[in-house]
Image (tube, helix red, strand yellow):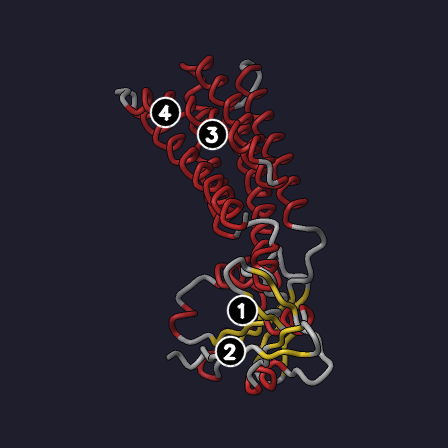
Amino acid sequence: MSMGVTKRRIQRLGGSSLIVTIPKTWAKKMGLGVGDQVVVVDEGDHLKILPPETRYSEKAVSTSIRLVSFAREIPLDKLLDCAYINGFNRLSIQIPVSHINDTDKIVRQVSSYPKASSFSFKHDNQLIVEFGALTETPSRALKNYNSKAQEILEMLHDYISSGKGVNPEEAATRLDEELRKLENLIDMVERGSIKESLVIPSQAELRPPSVAMVRASTRVLRLLAKDLLGYSRTGKKKALEIISLLKNLYSEAIGGMASNSGRRMANALEVSHKLHAIASSMLESRNNLEARLGAYLNTFINLVEMAITGSVCMSLRER
């Protein structure tokens, strides 16, 4: 039997109430005593007992890393991204004495990290990075993401449909800047979904794996936008058709996830079938740009479909 599994006998309290005791070692570890409240979550075929949300959250609010060799080989902004996206409010970076000469460089990197709200340096070679608390729910953040994505796709549509007077390089640069902002928005959504799932997973508004698929699709969207601009010089009509379908797909898929609407997610899957047909025909093209665009499009659709499937499956499981 696992060290984390114990059997408890159900006892009667009063006339009709049933009680089960909790392990004393667990109560001590969580700082619980007589009179304290715990959260009991009905998971269908079993119950889950959690300490009060505030105490549980405090244990998940901070993390730390020591800049040993493996961490030094990974760009610091990637380590900061990991801490931010995984829901931590605070990251403690311990700088070994052997690497003390790198302190100024590390401080400069942290000070330029856009998601850090503040940082401080302690006397024991410890750098504390604060990310700050979330200001909105994951669902609200996902709706903002959806609005921004629609704005960017409309911008791409306008660039292609207007044709004359638009500098392709300037358009590509502007779109890339806006898509980077979109990536920051989905980071906030993923951060919120993970923080919620740490407290009461069954009551989280969004599922972290599904949000991760949306995050990946955002990266692919950057590649799609760039190639659609290039492809529109010879295939303007098809490029505009693809963009219109992408807008519809994202609107229904992301909007459906944010509002937990099965109807909207089903609508998105219908649109994805149309896009798959277009992508398949493009993959057979001898034109390298068209074939590559078809590959990006297929990847994008698959990621969105996986996000939808994950959301739907979790909803069915709960019901």
- The residue wearing badge 1 is 106
Disc 4 marks a residue whose amino acid type is Ala
N-terminal of the pair, mark 4 or mark 2, is 2
Mark toward the start of the polypeptide (3 vs 1): 1
Q: CA distance from mark 4 to mark 2?
A: 49 Å
Label 2 vs label 3: CA separation? 49 Å
Q: As shown in the figure, which amino acid type bears the numbered disc 2?
A: Ile
- Mark 3 → mark 4, Cα distance in angstroms: 15 Å
Q: Position of residue 71 (x, y in %)?
A: 43, 70
Residue at 27% x, 22% y: name it: 284
Q: Is residue 267 left or right of residue 69?
A: right
Quarter of the rendering containing residue 298:
top left
Above/below status of 137 relative to 40: above
Q: Tell me whether circle 1 and circle 2 mark residues in contact (CB < 8 Å).
A: yes
The CA span between labels 3 and 1 is 46 Å
Question: Which circle, 4 or 1, is nearer the viewer?
Answer: 4
> Where residue 128 sits in the image (x, y, percent)?
62, 73
Which comes sooner in the sequence, label 2 or label 3?
Answer: 2
Q: Say what secondary structure mark 2 lies in.
A: loop
Measure the alpha-carbon separation of dots 1 and 2: 9 Å
Q: Which residue is mark 2?
A: 95
Q: Is residue 108 above or below residue 29?
A: above
Most foreground residue, 238 or 33: 33
Amino acid marked by disc 3: Leu
Residue 84 visible in image: no
Camera-nearest residue between 35 and 91: 35
* Residue occupied by mark 4: 279
Label drawn at residue 181: none
Q: Is residue 38 left or right of residue 104?
A: right
